[in-house]
Image: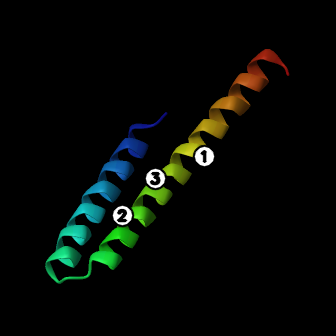
Amino acid sequence: MNVDLIFRIAAIGILVSILNIVLKQSNRDEMAMLTTIAGVVVVLLMVVREIVKLFDTVKALFGF
């Protein structure tokens, strides 16, 4: 795992939270919810890619 991944996830979290605050203050609660969901989906996709790499490495290590 790379430290760069942690910084990317943190940056996405900060960006989503700022967008969420701005959209809620402008009475666009639905858009704030959608940006939050989109941020969570993006982070989950990033984490799933890393988990797939981990399983591939374990498979190669044990020769499955």
Residue tagged 1: 49
Instruction: Please tell me which of labels 3 and 1 falls first in the chain.
Output: 3
Considering only order in the chain, which callout, 2 or 3, is on the residue closer to the N terminus? 2
Percent position of residue 14, x then y: 25, 58
Which element type, helix, strand or loop, lies under badge 1?
helix
Mark closer to the observer (3, 1): 3
Q: Find the distance from the CA under tag 2 to the CA under tag 1.
A: 20 Å
Residue at (85%, 22%) from the top-left corner? 64
Q: What residue type is labelled 2?
A: Thr
Which comes sooner in the sequence, label 2 or label 1? 2
Q: Residue drawn at (36%, 64%), measured in percent from left and top?
A: 36
Do labels 3 and 2 touch, CB within 8 Å? no
Residue 61 vertical placement versus 50 (above, below): above
Crowding around mark 2 (Cα neighbors within 10 Å: few <14, some 14 to 19, many 20+) is some
Q: Do the residues labelled 3 and 1 touch (CB within 8 Å)?
A: no
Of badges 2 and 1, the one in the foreground is 2
Residue 36 badge: 2
What residue lies at 34% left-to-right and 77% top-to-bottom?
Answer: 30
Near mark 1 (Cα within 10 A), the count class, few <14, some 14-19 or many ≥20, is: few
Name the residue beneath numbered marker 3: 43
Residue 35 percent location from the top left of the image? 37, 70
For label 2, the SS is helix
Q: Where is residue 3 in the image (x, y as percent from the top left)?
A: 39, 38
Q: Which amino acid does label 1 sit on?
A: Arg
Q: Is mark 3 on a helix, strand or loop?
A: helix
* Residue 60 disc label: none
User: Looking at the rendering, which quadrant does residue 38 occupy?
Assistant: bottom left
Q: Which of marks 3 and 2 is in front?
A: 2
Q: In this view, does 51 lie to the left or right of 15?
A: right
The kind of residue on which mark 3 rests is Val
